[in-house]
């Protein structure tokens, strides 16, 4: 899995989220892989965030307001 979302996580967290602070990340599944199941991509993204030492507080899909989008609430360590 790749894409702009993952390339920019470090810059976002380093620039905008204080230590032990909360941040909101929006993920557009179709920008990552147009053929994959969005639910699988959300799970993969959450696993990737956890592997990057970020605590995922909550994950919500934005359907029906924005198809194939999810919001992640993260907390830094």
Image (cartoon, rainbow, N blue to C red):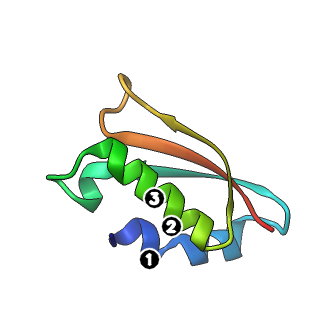
Asked if residue 53 can be seen in this view, the reply is yes
Which residue shows up at 14% across the image and 52% down it?
Answer: 35
In three-dimensional space, the C-alpha distance between marks 2 and 3, rounded to whole angstroms, equals 5 Å
In three-dimensional space, the C-alpha distance between marks 2 and 1, rounded to whole angstroms, equals 12 Å
Q: Which residue is mark 2?
A: 48
Q: Which residue is mark 3?
A: 45
Which residue shows up at 37% across the image and 70% down it?
Answer: 4
Q: Seen in the image, is 44 located left or right of residue 58?
A: left
Between residue 70 and residue 45, name the one nearer to us. Answer: 45
- Residue 44 position, x and y percent, is 42, 58
Kindly state the secondary structure of the residue where label 2 is placed: helix
Q: Quadrant of residue 18?
A: bottom right
In three-dimensional space, the C-alpha distance between marks 3 and 1, rounded to whole angstroms, equals 12 Å
Residue 22 marker: none
Which residue shows up at 21% across the image and 52% down it?
Answer: 36
Kindly state the secondary structure of the residue where label 1 is placed: helix
Q: Which residue is mark 1?
A: 7
């Amino acid at each position: 899995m790749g894409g702009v979302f993952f390339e920019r996580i470090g810059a976002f967290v380093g620039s905008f989220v204080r230590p032990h602070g909360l941040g909101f990340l929006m993920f557009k599944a179709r920008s990552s892989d147009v053929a994959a199941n969005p639910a699988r991509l959300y799970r993969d993204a959450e696993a990737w965030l956890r592997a990057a030492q970020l605590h995922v507080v909550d994950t919500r899909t934005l359907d029906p307001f924005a198809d194939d989008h999810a919001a992640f609430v993260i907390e830094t360590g």
